[in-house]
Amino acid sequence: MSEQIALMAKGLTKSYGKVVALRGVDLQVRRGEIFGFLGPNGAGKTTTIRCLLDLIRPDGGDVQVLGLDPQVDPVAVRAQVGYLPGELSMEDNLKVEGQLRYYNDLRGNKIDWERVRQLARRLDLDLRRSIKNLSKGNKQKVGIVQALMHRPQLLLMDEPTSGLDPLMQQEVYRLLREARDDGATVFFSSHIISEVDALADRVAIIRQGVIVEEAEPQQLVQLALRRMQVRFKEAVDPTPLAAVPGITMLSQSNGMMAHLQVEGEMDGLIKALAAFPVSDFETERPSLEEIFLAYYEAEKEGN
């Protein structure tokens, strides 16, 4: 495999009994990039990551991680990888520092403990707290620290910002960018389009166990889908709004309210609304699966 490729999967398949999780996943991640793995819950993101680390065995296909076959030499692979699972197993009775020292023991006591303290400070994580007293968000921070603390060549992060508030999400983005700038490769899964758009250099989109598209983050704007509820100060005829590109009129109520679906950027609709006596409006983001259904079904109809 080329020295420029950090991670490769070809024809990856996996079933759990009658449930087919992966249907032939092909991935190629270059060294030194942040690669987003985008898909709704249940699409196969976690199964793919576990197969990459040989935590579960695929039914078929080939995998190479940092030039190694994880089925042949899983210890060598994991020594160079920082892995954040969706649910990290921790010992409730340990303090955070004790839990991280345990992970350090597993890695041969090679961790610079000052780096651990620095990461904890940046994530506002109290090393003296007991694991059993931590919130979901603080447990997620422990997972992020253990993935980053040994400066791995490759980071495999399954939904890295799950449970974190927006400010802490931004700090995690900064940490991952810094890891990339230091030479690491970052592969992270997410079901949030805006997160992948903000962080990734490239993105693969998985749906129902198949990669349906690879794209630059800027191309994700075509998957932007919102619903908007607009209230008017007085009764109007809102039907001209449906003529704006990307706008679908879902319903209206006596000229006092309109429910719209917005595909792509909001700029055209905002300009069109300037001609109306708007009282207020609310926006809602559908689930990623709803967005995929709208986008890919429309694409099929156009073919």
Image (spheres, rainbow, N blue to C red):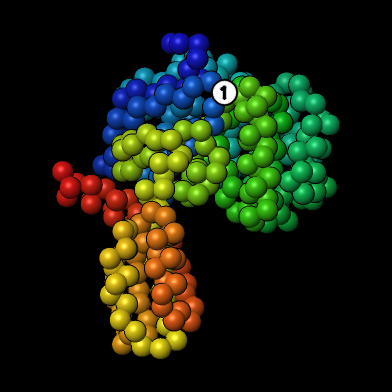
For this rendering, which residue is in front, 2 or 45? 2
Residue wearing tag 1:
32
Residue 298: where, in percent of width, then height? 23, 52
For this rendering, which residue is in front, 92 or 117? 117
Q: Amino acid at mark 1?
A: Gly
Can residue 39 be seen here? yes
Q: Residue furthest front?
A: 275
Residue at point 67%, 39% (across, down): 174
Residue at point 48%, 37% (across, down): 36
- Give the answer, above or below, for where 156 lies relative to 279: above
Residue 294: where, in percent of width, then height? 28, 55
Residue at point 55%, 40% (across, down): 199
Residue at point 34%, 22% (across, down): 10
- Would you say 95 lies left or right of 56 here? right
- Would you say 3 lies left or right of 129 here? left
- Give the answer, above or below, for where 126 lies relative to 200: below
Splitting the image into 4 quarters, where does residue 144 fall?
top right
Residue 77: where, in percent of width, then height? 55, 19
The C terminus, quarter of image: top left
Splitting the image into 4 quarters, where does residue 216 fall?
top left
Residue 21: where, in percent of width, then height? 33, 39
